[in-house]
Image (spheres, coloured by chain):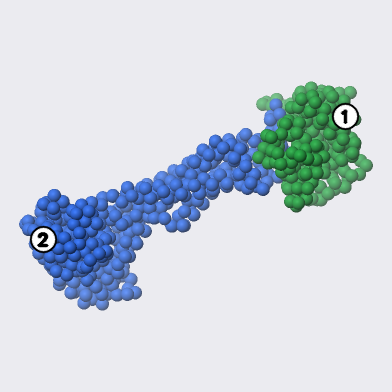
Chain colours: A green, B blue
Amino acid sequence: MDAAETTDAVTDESRDVGPVVRADRVSREYRVGSATVRAVDRVSMEVRRGEFLAVTGPSGSGKSTLLHLLGGVDTPTEGRVLLGGRDLGRMNERQREKLRLRRVGLVFQRFYLLPALTARENVELPMAEAGSDRKERHERAGELLARVGLGDRTEHRPPQLSGGQRQRVAIARALANRPALLLADEPTGELDRDTSRDILELFLDLTRSGETTLVVGTHDAELAEGAGRGLRLVDGRLAT
Amino acid sequence: MLFEHAWRELRRHPGRTLLALAGVAVSTAMLLDMLMLSDGIQESFRDLFSTSDYSVRVTPAGTLPFQTGATIDGVDELRRRLLETSEVTGVGPVLGSNLLAAGDSVRVFALGVDPDRQGIYRLLEGREPAAPDELLIGDDVRSQLAVEVGDSLRLRTGAFLGGTGGDGASARTFRVVGRADFLYASAGERPVALRIDALGTLTGRRDRASFLMVSLREGLDADSAVAALRERFPGVGLASVGELLEQARERLSYFRQLAYILGTVSVIVTLLLVGTVMAVSINDRYGTIAALRAMGISRRTVLLGLGVETLVLCTAGAAVGLGLGLATAEYLGTILADFPGIPRAVRFFVFDPGTAALALGGTVLGGLAAAQVPAWRAAGLEIAPTLHEEEL
C-alpha cells in the first residue's frame, strides 16, 4: 500500500465511528548519554471523534512525547499507535509525513509561524504542500482566519501580531487541510490569562461544531478544566 | 511564492544580508577579473597579430623581434629569395633603432619600414613617408615633443644599452608627414616611423632588418609553411603568429598562474561565506524547520526553500559582482597598460559573455553547493528531539 492509499484509508476510517486515535501500551525511550530515559511508559488511551481531551502533568512527565506519538511525529519503542485505524508503526517516514500533512493538525507553544510570510500565506503553506490550487487555498485561508477571529489581519505578518493572534494564525494553519485530529502542545504556554481564555473558547467552539478532534497537552488548569475529558501523566505513566 | 519568501526572509535581516551580498559581490568580481585575466592577454595578442595579413616573422636566428639588438644582414637578397618561394606573397622588413630627439634629452624608438609593406602601424593623419627625410610620429612623441604634422624633428643616433642605436653618431632633420597608431608600442617607447633605407643610412645599418614580416598565400597553413621555409632558410629564425602566441603565453604564464590561484581563492571564499551565512541563518530556524517537518512539510520542500534562498542571495550578489568586476578590470587595465615590454594595445582583461556567465555560474553553483551541508542537516533533523529542545 503506498502513501496515498494509506492516507485515503485513514481518511475513510477516521470518519467512521471508531476512535480517531488509539494508543496500545505505548512506550518511548530516549538515550541521554549512557542512560536510557523512558519518556512515555506503557500508555493506553483512545480519543473519539469530536472529543476535546486535555493531557496534563508536570514538566517532563511525557506530555509532548505522547502528543508526538499520537500525531506520528515520533514512533514508539514499544506498543502501537492507530490513527484512523492504521498502525503508524507499519508506515514508512514518507507515509507518516503525508499522513501528518493531511490528517493531523499541530499547534505549538512557540507558534512557529514563518515571520516573512503574511498570516494568510502561513495558513496556505500546508495546503500548498498538499497540492491545493492557488485560488482554493487563498479562499480557505481567508475563511479560516475569519473563523479564528483574524479576518482583518490576513495580510499582517507574525511580527505585526500579538501572541494571541499569532497562536490563532497557528490554529488556522493547523486546520488548513481539514485534519481529523488536532494536537496542541502547551498552546497557551506563552500567552497571558485573558488570551489563554480566548484560545480555550476557540478550541471549545471548534470541537462543539464537530470540525475537529482535539488533544491538548497543557499545564494550564483552566484550559484542562475546559476540556471534556482529562488524562494525567506522571513520569510517563497515566495516573489513575 | 518560494522566490518571494526567500527574498522576504533575506530582507528580515538587512545587516546580515547586505554583508553577505557584499561578500559574494567582491568574490564574484575577483573571480570574473581572474577569468578575464587568465585568457585575456593571449586573446588580446591574438587580436593584435591578426590586425594584418603578415602571419610569419623572420628574425635573426634564435631571437624574437626586438628581443636583442641583433639584425639580419642582406635583407634585399633574403627578401627576393623569400618572394621567389611558392608560399610567400609579401615581405615587409622592419629595422628598429633608438634615436635621440629634442637636443638629446628625449629618446625615441625609430622603426624603419617599407611603407607599402608594413603591418606595425595604422596611419591616422597625413600620409606615408615617401622621401628619406619624411617621418611619422605617434601620439606620445606628438605630446611630449610638441610636434605636429608639417613640423620638423631632428633625430640623432647615440650609444644605447641593448645596442640598437648604431655605432657612430649622426643626425638628420625630418619632416613630419603623418601621425600613426603604433600597434606594438609599449609604454614609454615613443615610436616614430621612417623609410627603412633612411634609417639604415642614419644608423649605418643599410641592408639590414631587425625582422621581416611575411605574408603567405591565402589558404596556406602558417605552421606548415614555416616548417617548409625553415629548411630552405636555415640561417634565420622563422616563427608563425601561432608560435609567437605560444611564446607570449609562456612568457606571461605567471599571469595565468596568478589568475588561477586568485580565482580559486575567490571560489573558496564564496563557499565559506555562503556556507557560513546559510548555516547561521538555518541554525536560527531549527525550531521552525522541525515544526514544519512535524506538520508534514516534506524534506524536499524544506531543501527547495533553503536552496531558493541561497540562489537569490548568490544571484543578487553575483550580479552586483559582475558590474564591480568590470569596473575593477577597467581600472586595473589602465594601470597594467604601462607594464614594460608589453604592447599597450594588449589588454590584460578581455571581457566576453562566456566569461561573465562562468563567473556568475561559478558563484551561484559554489554558493548552492556550500549551502547544501547546513540545508541537508536542517532537512534531516530528528523532528521530535529538536522540538523538545526548542521548547525547553
Which residue is pictured at 26% across the width and 50% down the height?
A: B340
Quarter location, residue B347: bottom left
Which residue is pictured at 62% across the width and 42% down the height?
A: B8
Which residue is pictured at 38% across the width and 50% down the height?
A: B330
Whether residue B260 is visible: no
Q: Position of residue B357 (x, y in %)?
A: 49, 54
User: Which labelled disc corresponds to residue B19?
Assistant: none
Chain identity of mark 2:
B
- Label 1 or label 2, whichever lies nearer to me, is 2
Quarter location, residue A187: top right
Above or below: residue A192 compared with residue A48:
above
> Of all residues shown, which one is farthest toward the right?
A17
* Badge 1 and badge 2 both on one subunit: no
Question: Mark 1 and mark 2: span between their CA atoms?
Answer: 113 Å
Chain identity of mark 1:
A
SS for tag 1? loop
How many residues crowd mark 2 within 10 Å: few (<14), some (14–19), many (20+)? some
Q: Position of residue B380 (x, y in %)?
A: 66, 40
* Residue hosting label 1: A227
Above or below: residue B81 compared with residue B43:
below
User: Which labelled disc corresponds to residue B173?
Assistant: 2
Whether residue B278 is visible: yes
Q: Are marks 1 and 2 in contact (CB under 8 Å)?
A: no
Q: Position of residue A181 (x, y in %)?
A: 83, 39
SS for tag 2? strand
Q: Amino acid at mark 2?
A: Thr
Would you say B55 lies left or right of B201 here?
right
Which residue is pictured at 57% across the width and 47% down the height?
A: B311
- Looking at the rendered structure, the number of numbered marks drawn on it comes to 2
